[in-house]
Amino acid sequence: MEAIEVENVVKRFGDVEALRGVSFSVREGEIFGLLGPNGAGKTTLLRTILGLLRPTAGSVRIRGIDISERPETVHRFVGWVPQERAMDPYLTARENLLFIAGLHHIPPREARARAAELLELVELSEAADRTVWEYSGGMRRRLQLAMGMVHRPQLLLLDEPSLGLDVQTRRRMWSVIEALRRAGT
């Protein structure tokens, strides 16, 4: 089965055509990257795939489900790590993960176990109870990846996953992403 199918997607904002006839598919278990200069429409395309924006024309299917017809169904098994920092800097990493787990209606005991598992995965266990305000950029980016994984998505969309990371942290991030792929994401 195709994980993502994008067919002739067009997105206009008034007179600005942000996407023009974009088509591609991504197979289950595949790591797929969108490359292009700033302003090329990559984030707009990701937001369209997620159902946060409706395409002006064309269609998007996630695991065979048309996103425009059933976005709530798709959101149950899709995780998203946005380009911008989407965490509360005054909470700890653990508290941020538990907050996201609550949004996904994950029971408290399971949420605590999942948070511990993800903190270990992204190598933040020792800093789990420090406020995010104290974190470096790389630590925040790894936490953001963990936040996108709280509900065990089958598909993970990452917008600029290595933005602002040093070489060592970037390698660590890609190792985590490869481990997630091997585990079925």
Image (cartoon, rainbow, N blue to C red):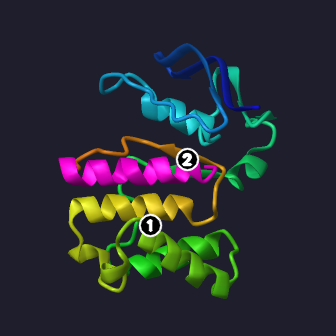
Image position of 168 (left or right of 97): left
- Work out whether residue 18 can be spotted: yes
Q: Label the magenta part by its dominant secondary structure.
A: helix
Residue positioned 53% across, 79% down in the render? 98
- Quadrant where the image shows the N terminus: top right
* Mark 1 closeness class: few <14, some 14–19, many ≥20 residues within 10 Å: some
Give the residue number, with chain letter if any, for mark 2: 181
Magenta segment range?
Answer: 167-185
Q: Is residue 20 above or below residue 92?
A: above
Image position of 76 (left or right of 117): right
Residue 121: which numbered mark, if any? Answer: 1
In x, y percent, where is residue 35?
Answer: 38, 24
Amino acid at dot 1: Leu
Amino acid at dot 2: Arg
At mark 1, the secondary structure is helix
- Work out whether residue 84 can be spotted: no
Residue positioned 34% across, 25% down in the render? 39
In x, y percent, where is residue 55?
Answer: 63, 26
Q: Is residue 84 magenta?
A: no
Residue positioned 43% across, 25% down in the render? 41
Q: Is residue 168 magenta?
A: yes
Q: Quadrant of residue 4?
A: top right
In x, y percent, where is residue 66?
Answer: 78, 33
